Amino acid sequence: MNDATPARGMLRLLRAILGRSYPRIIGANRDKSWLFYDTVLPLLGTIAFVYVYKALGAPERFVGYVIMGGATVAFWMNVMWSMAAQFYWDKQGGNLELYMVVPCGIPAILLGMSFGGFVGTVIRAIAIVAIGSLLFDVHYTVSQWPVFLLVFGVAIVGLYGLGVTFASLFLLWGREAWHMANLFMEPVFFLSGFYFPVRALGFWAGMGASLIPLTLALDAMRQLLFPGTHPPFLPLGTELGILGALAISFIVLARFLLRKMEYLARREGRLSLRF
């Protein structure tokens, strides 16, 4: 196809997704300080928790729990700052109005944001797991790779669906988006059991925390990585089923809020930055 020929249908959608993901896959890596910020700094916090468990004489599997939690931090940081708060920053930069009128539509923009953020984050998460495992000689036993990948995939869909939901909410809330993104950081680190099994919170607190896809995803992956040593919060099949329900629910909710946001943009002009 000639470059001057306008792309249509699926080709236009794919071009929009790749174009929006390009800054997050290629552009972000041009600034080497971000590699340090996204990889080394989360690893330092993870190492601190590892030494706490070692000082307490905890079983070695807890070191693996902490390393997995440290890798998951990268995904939550990406969802909150590069998904939930992104539309608010685009509004400040004057790009949101362009998104509202592009032929590909808002969903393609969001898919590009999600794909680009996921690729960059998964590389950093793998680096955190690899470095942490080498430093502390952690070994994993995964006998059910298809189930592990299924849990991971469903959790990522639910997590980025939650990110799109927050993106619409933060944008409608306006300048409070920055504070809300900060507000959701540390409590989620605690409630999701990033550095300890979520069952330690108790059943009802754990069920409440399960509204965040990372909670059950971490517990399920720990069951698969350390079979027979990790007291599960819920059976693996139950956790996978709840994760699937959360993924579908967040996608439906995100679609509803996106339509609401577009309606306000066209009817009231509330989403444009006015000086």
Image (spheres, grey):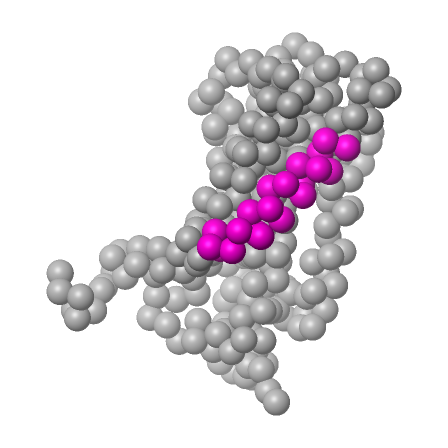
What's the residue at 80%, 36% (across, down)? 205
Relative to 11, 185 lies left or right = right
Relative to 86, 100 lies left or right = left
Q: Let me know if residue 206 appears in the view.
A: yes
* Picture quarter with the N terminus: bottom left
Q: Tag count in the figure?
A: 0
Residue span colored magenta: 28-48
Q: Residue 80, position in %: x, y?
A: 63, 54
Q: 1 or 260, which is in the foreground?
A: 1
Q: Is 47 in the magenta?
A: yes
What's the residue at 80%, 20% (across, down)? 54
**Residue reaching furthest to the left:** 2
**Residue reaching furthest to the front:** 32
* Picture quarter with the C terminus: bottom right
In which quadrant of the rendered view does residue 204 lie?
top right
Is 43 placed above or below 144 here?
below
In which quadrant of the rendered view does residue 146 lie?
top left
Q: Residue 236, position in %: x, y?
A: 60, 22
Q: 248 or 130, which is in the foreground?
A: 130
In which quadrant of the rendered view does residue 240 lie?
top right
Tell me the chief SS of the magenta region. Answer: helix
Q: Residue 164, position in %: x, y?
A: 55, 56
Q: 110 or 38, which is in the foreground?
A: 38
What's the residue at 62%, 13% (across, down)? 227
Q: Residue 95, position in %: x, y?
A: 48, 74
Relative to 56, 12 lies left or right = left
Q: Is 54 in the magenta?
A: no
Q: 158 or 95, which is in the foreground?
A: 95
